[in-house]
């Protein structure tokens, strides 16, 4: 009997996860997305007076995560898959509970120990996945939003440079900063770079 093969036509961000689950069951997959989810340019999210967020799809969760670093608002989700895309359950101090395994849930669950370092690599992969990183690099959400932010930053530095025609040291510095912003588009952007961006904007306590 020929081995089972599956054709996955969902957007690539969803198809990768489905293919991984099928691969674990011995089923080969061919990914041929019928559509691509592409975020549109926007001036930024104004969350003033917003008390909660409502997500109707995992794509909406990923788009929001790429558009802002705000993580303090309560989230309501339509369906378990959407809710799972919006959270990661982390169980700490597993060195004090040998043999502990996280309960089976739809959302990613990671058990870690800050003392021994156990589980930290799994946590790293879970954060990257939640932020839109795939085995092929950045997702379309993450790359598009990051590129837009880089272009806005470069434009700002060029405008500032234009106001300093007589002060060459300031003029040159603004050009250097504009070039560095554009390098974020033209240069390589790795998983470690992404983690650096994430944790640079968060205050993590015990």
Image: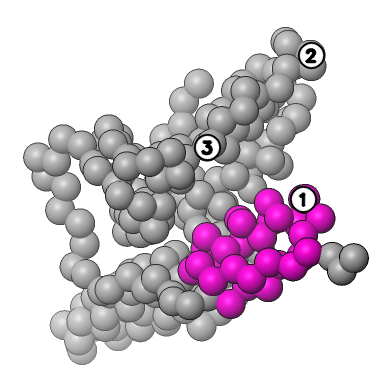
Residue 202 visible in rendering: no
Is 114 rendered above or below residue 124? above
Image position, residue 69 (x, y; %): 34, 49
Q: Which residues are magenta?
A: 4-32
The residue shown at (53%, 75%) is 33
Q: Quadrant of residue 151?
A: bottom left
102 and 200: which is toward the camera: 102
Nearer to us: label 1 or label 3: 1
Q: Earlier in the sequence, mark 2 or mark 3?
A: 2
Residue 29 falls within the magenta-colored stretch: yes
Q: Residue at x 71, y 33 (%)?
A: 119
Labels 1, 2: front one: 1
Q: Secondary structure at mark 3?
A: loop
Residue 181, x across and y down, in percent: 41, 75
Q: Nearer the viewer, residue 8 or 110?
A: 8
Question: Marks 2 and 3, how far apart in space?
Answer: 23 Å
Outermost residue toward the front in this view: 1
- Give the alpha-carbon distance from disc 1 to disc 3, as whole Å: 18 Å
Q: Position of residue 102 (x, y in %)?
A: 65, 24
Say which quadrant the N terminus sits in: bottom right
Look at discs 2 and 3 and give the one toward the viewer. Answer: 3
**Mark 1 vs 3, N-terminal side:** 1
- Estimate how packed mark 3 is, as few (under 14), some (14 to 19) or many (20 or more) residues with alpha carbons within 10 Å: some
Q: Which mark is residue 98?
A: 2
Q: Secondary structure at mark 2?
A: loop
**Label disc, if present, on residue 107 of the rendered structure:** 3
Q: Is residue 171 left or right of residue 23?
A: left
Give the Cα distance between marks 1 and 2: 26 Å
Q: Residue furthest right?
A: 1
- Residue 75 in the figure: left or right of residue 118: left
């Amino acid at each position: 009997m020929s081995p089972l093969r599956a054709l996955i036509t969902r957007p690539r961000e969803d198809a990768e996860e489905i293919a991984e689950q099928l691969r674990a069951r011995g089923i080969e997959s061919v990914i041929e997305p019928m559509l691509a989810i592409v975020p549109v340019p926007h001036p930024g999210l104004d969350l003033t007076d917003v008390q909660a967020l409502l997500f109707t799809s995992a794509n909406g969760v990923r788009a929001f995560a790429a558009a802002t670093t705000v993580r303090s608002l309560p989230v309501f989700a339509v369906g378990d898959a959407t809710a799972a895309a919006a959270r990661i359950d982390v169980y700490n101090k597993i060195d004090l509970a040998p043999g502990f395994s996280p309960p089976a849930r739809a959302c990613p669950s990671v058990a870690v120990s800050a003392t021994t370092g156990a589980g930290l690599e799994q946590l790293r992969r879970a954060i990257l996945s939640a932020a839109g990183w795939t085995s092929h690099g950045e997702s379309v959400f993450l790359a598009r939003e990051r590129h837009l932010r880089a272009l806005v930053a470069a434009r700002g530095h060029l405008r500032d440079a234009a106001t300093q025609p007589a002060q060459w040291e300031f003029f040159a510095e603004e050009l250097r900063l504009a070039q560095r912003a554009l390098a974020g588009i033209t240069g390589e952007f790795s998983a470690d770079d992404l983690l650096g961006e994430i944790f640079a904007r968060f205050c993590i306590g015990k």
